[in-house]
Structure formats: structure tokens, C-alpha cells
Image (cartoon, grey):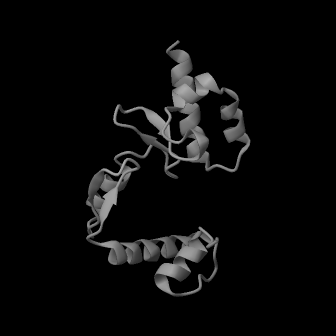
Amino acid sequence: MEKRNLTAAYKFYCGQDLKNAHSAEADTLATYEVFKAQIARYEGEEVTDLLGNTRGVIVNDMRKVHDLINEKMVDLAGRFIFNEKGEECFNFGKHKGKPITQVLKEEPSYYDWMMKGDFPLDTKRKFTQVKLRSFNQR
């Protein structure tokens, strides 16, 4: 299976090896180059959501790309998204598509599992925010 990291993306999209990986400057420049290459490669293609609904078309316009990608994202990694009702839902694993509040109610230990897991800090922070908000609404 292909690796899913910046070094692999840089090699795939830019056709080069990433020098000085993990330095702030090299990673920032590589991210920018990968993004430009992705726009060039996929421009004009439709983007669909998890339900197969067309969300829009990829164009070389930062505002339009932002709106297209972030309309449903809750966290930066895309582990949580908003559903049609505006509820934060899981976008991965066994609970994919389920509202976070439902999972917290039915399987409260899932919170601890995620907090101990290798998830981005932003994902953990958003998960905690939803948990605290649902706790305060009771």
C-alpha cells in the first residue's frame, strides 16, 4: 500500500524527493507545491460527498476550493463532518456517518479510545468540544 504522508504526496504529485522533510520551511513549501499540482491534476473534476451528492467542481480559485472542501468538515483532518442536519458525525471507522453525540451516548468509552489514539490534536479538541457541549445540554 502506498504511504499517505507529505513525502509520498510530494513524490507522486511533484515527481521529486522531498529534501529536509519535517523542517518547517521544507514541509510548508512542499505542501504548497503538492496543492498546486493537485489543482492542476484535478481541475474540472466533480467532488462528491459520502452520499454521492455532487458538491461542486474543482477550480483554480482558493476561495472556491476552500468553500468546496470545508463546507462539511468539522476538524482539519476530516475525521468529523457535518451531516445534512448540521450534526457533527464520524467520517471514518465503525461509526462512520453516526452523530458524535449518539456514539458518546451509546459507547462512552470511544472517547477515551480516541484520546489515547494517534489522532491529530485538532481532531481531539473538536471531539472534546462536542462532548462538553452535549454534556452541558443535559
Instruction: Give the residue at x 51% y 87%.
Output: 15
Q: Residue furthest right?
A: 116
Considering only vertical position in the picture, is 130 above or below 56? above
Q: Residue furthest top?
A: 138
Taking 57 as reference, is 109 left or right?
Answer: right
Taking 50 as reference, is 18 left or right?
Answer: right
Choose top left, top right, bottom left or bottom right for residue 11.
bottom right
Instruction: Give the residue at x 34% y 47%.
Output: 71
Considering only vertical position in the picture, is 61 above or below 90? below
Instruction: Give the residue at x 53% y 38%.
Output: 126
Choose top left, top right, bottom left or bottom right for residue 131.
top right
| Residue 52 position in % (x across, y down) | 35, 52
| Residue 137 position in % (x across, y down) | 49, 15
- Image quadrant containing the N terminus: bottom right
Considering only vertical position in the picture, is 136 above or below 121? above
Choose top left, top right, bottom left or bottom right for residue 19.
bottom right
Instruction: Give the residue at x 53% y 74%.
Output: 9
Considering only vertical position in the picture, is 56 above or below 8? above
In terms of depth relative to the viewer, which is nearer, 108 or 35?
Answer: 108
Taking 128 as reference, is 51 left or right?
Answer: left
In terms of depth relative to the viewer, which is nearer, 25 or 133?
Answer: 133
Taking 39 as reference, is 136 left or right?
Answer: right
| Residue 33 position in % (x across, y down) | 44, 77
| Residue 108 position in % (x across, y down) | 66, 26
